[in-house]
Amino acid sequence: MEPITRAQLQNASAAAAAEKARAAQREQEIKGQLAAEEFYKEIQRTAEFGAMTYACSKSMALGVAFDTMLYWTKEHFPDCDVTTEIRHMHDPTYGIRVSWAGTPAETLEDRRLHKQTSW
């Protein structure tokens, strides 16, 4: 068996660090997706009762999780006004606000079906 060279050790170390960074990135993406799913359910409950025409998410720090949550919220409610808002000035956390005029579309499939059949 040949001894491992310094270059091989450095390459292995760099590969391990890159894999660790990818895992951390994916973990944040999953956190954002789960938060978006929870927020989606909250919006549906709020719209079902019809008492309000908006819903606000929980506060989050800016980062991959927040960006992922914002992306999925916009994806699920393209006909609604999706905005971000600053929650605290000293501890910078942000929320997502979704406003609607009528009832938000039930699901992505309902919207796709509506687009395909409304011509």
Image: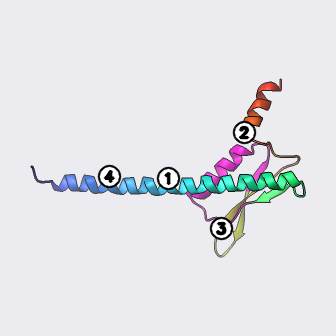
Residue 112's x, y, as percent?
74, 32
Residue 51's x, y, as percent?
90, 58
Res. 89 in view: yes
**Of callouts 1 and 3, the N-terminal one:** 1
**Of callouts 4 and 3, the N-terminal one:** 4
Q: Determine the residue positioned at 65% across, 48% down.
A: 71
Secondary-structure class at tag 1? helix
30 on left or right of 45: left
**Of callouts 2 and 3, the N-terminal one:** 3
Q: CA distance from mark 1 to mark 3?
A: 21 Å
Q: Nearer the viewer, mark 1 or mark 3?
A: 1
Secondary-structure class at tag 2? helix
Quarter occupied by residue 79: top right
Tell me the amino acid under the disc marked 1. Answer: Arg
**Residue named by callout 4:** 15
Tell me the amino acid under the disc marked 4. Answer: Ala
**Of callouts 4 and 2, the N-terminal one:** 4
Q: Nearer the viewer, mark 1 or mark 4?
A: 1
Secondary-structure class at tag 4? helix
Q: Nearer the viewer, mark 4 or mark 2?
A: 2
Q: CA distance from mark 4 to mark 3?
A: 33 Å
Q: Report the magenta residues as a range.
A: 57-83
Tell me the amino acid under the disc marked 3. Answer: Thr
Between residue 47 and residue 12, name the one nearer to us. Answer: 47
Label number found at residue 93: 3
Callout 2–callout 3 Cβ contact below 8 Å: no
Q: Residue furthest right?
A: 51
Label number found at residue 26: 1
Q: Residue furthest bottom?
A: 90
